[in-house]
Amino acid sequence: MSFNPQFARLGEILIHEGFITEDQLKEALIKQTNFGLKIGETLIKLGHLTEKNLLTALHMQLGYDIVKQQEMLDLDVATVSRIPEPFAVQNRVIAIREDSDGVVVAMTDPENLVVIDNLKKILGKNLKPMLIGDSLIHDSLEKYYKSIRTTSQVEDAVGGFDFVAIDEDENEISISAASADADAPIVKLINLIINEAIKAGATDIHIEPLTKHTRIRFRIDGALREVMNPPIGMHMGVISIVKVMSKLNIAERRLPQDGHISLKTQYKSVDVRVSITPTVLGEKVVMRLLDKGDFGFKLTTLGFESEDMAIFSKIIHRPYGIIIVSGPTGSGKSTTLHAALKTIQDIETNIITVEDPVEYRLEGITQIETKEQIGLTFGSALRSVLRQDPDIVLIGEIRDEETADIAIKFSLTGHLVFTTLHANDAPSTVTRLIDIGIKPYLVGSSLSLVMAQRLVRIICPHCKVDYKPTEQEIIDCGIPAEQVDKIQYKIGTGCVHCDNTGFSGRTGIFELLTVNPEIRRIIYEGGNQDLIREAALRAGMRTLHDAAYNKMVQGVTSIREVIKMTVVE
């Protein structure tokens, strides 16, 4: 007699398909009562069964179609919101789409008649149930109902708002009233924007005027994402509130202004650096979020390859010299240097930092924040630091000849100096110091290590698939012909875990230039960056492109990210 899954128990189907053994089923039946779960969920909890195989067996037994991950990427929020959030979360159900026959709903238990009856009453239509896995529905409910809450909060904030710009003299909102009233729509909107940015792990908030609406974007994992679009009529009110919070001049709309806000939200304390600049459509705000909580990074988690880690660890334990980390804004320079300080910190060492601003708070380290408006510049702060008996000094950034000169003198008088500089790669960092005005012999004598750094995005592990690159991508990435077919290229297709971006998190890529005798001689002789690069490559330096290439070969990042973030020499 042939096996018919429609008349079999779930356990029998799982054994018949080879998904589990009889012993595993017996163990699950014994432990099922203790767990308070169904047999399939119990087998998954015990590690005997995958969610995918459970769904396959349920499909064979019950006949319902299985929801694919791709179907959950771009649901209509209006359709999802027809089922109230508490009911959807409690019964693990979500409305996918609506057609002429009724509403298609994804359920983990499409045989639950009580839930089906209640759904029919809620929706007032016929139902077409589909099967969905626990993890997929959990992520989908989290994503879409969060979006619904955010949208409704924006609508609540902007509802009834009727602010009209009249002319140059009379178009300011009554800020005193709005700031004093916590329920004022614009204050509510700004609170919502900042809270959502912090929850999403954003590093920057962009508030920019367009012709018909204001565009709010968050920078997450180095890329900007659009999150909401309030009406343009609110824009000037939003700008004015931000100016009041930042203690800036609300009447000045023609010149750029910089300020900062200290915030304490329900999640954490943050410092917000505010930059406001005039554009042809109105003023644009960029807010940089700096976490005031504990510094949670370690050198071992930043993405160093083992050989580079060994070099970096050795040099940061030297008693004197300069270590420079170079790269553009947002490339992780400060994170790397603070992780280094945390590694070498001990009770016998006096470590002092001078920063603008202090991005991370480090317990047991003296941190000084410059304040230009009262005369506490990098130069004046550093001169006072010398009288504070330091062993190690971190200078936030070398900005001019004065700062560079003090850094050089610190290192030549027996101090270990960490600092950053804006440059494209490690060799050009050396020549940049000379361009600033430092004598080549001083640069050569003091430099221990120059490290260029970037951050590349990590492919989302939940939607990582094989990828065949195009001919142009292979050329742009500089892959040698003999290696093209040996690499297993990966890419993220986009899923609910990564907000449909294909990436989740970032990791560092590093170019370490150790100043050896040959490079020191080239610097003394005023050699250009090409000579320095050639000498460094002979000594074994791996370029930023090589580092990114390695991450691609390891399946950590994609070929497109390598092309986007690095240059083939």
Image (cartoon, rainbow, N blue to C red):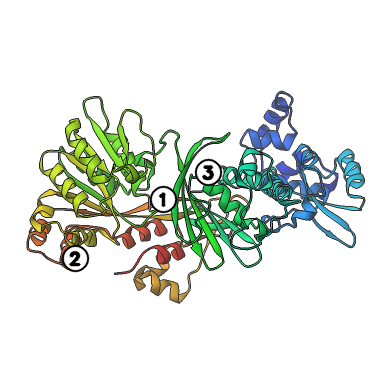
List x then y, in percent, for residue 328: 35, 57
Foreground: 248 or 425? Answer: 248
Q: How many marks?
A: 3
In this picture, is 53 found above or below 266? below
Q: Which quadrant would residue 149 be assigned to in this image?
A: top right
Q: Indicate which label's residue lies in the foreground, 3 or 1.
A: 3
Q: Amino acid at mark 2?
A: Gln
Q: CA distance from mark 2 to mark 3?
A: 46 Å
From the top left corner, tell me how far across and down residue 91 is, in percent: 79, 39
Mark 2 vs mark 1: give the one in front: 2
Give the mark toward the camera: 2 or 3: 3
Residue at the image position 69 percent from the left and 30 percent from the top? 28
Which residue type does callout 1 highlight? Thr
The answer to whether residue 272 of the structure is visible from this angle is no
Q: Residues within 10 Å of mark 3 (few under 14, many from 20)?
A: some
Q: Please name the residue shown 73% across and 55% down the image.
A: 162
Q: Which residue is mark 2?
A: 529
Name the kind of residue labelled 3 in the image: Met
Residue matched to label 1: 507
Task: Tell whether 7 sits left or right of 216.
Answer: right
For disc 3, the marked residue is 245
Instruction: Say if 526 sits above or below 186 in the image.
Output: below
Q: Quadrant of the C terminus?
A: bottom left
Tag 1 secondary structure: strand
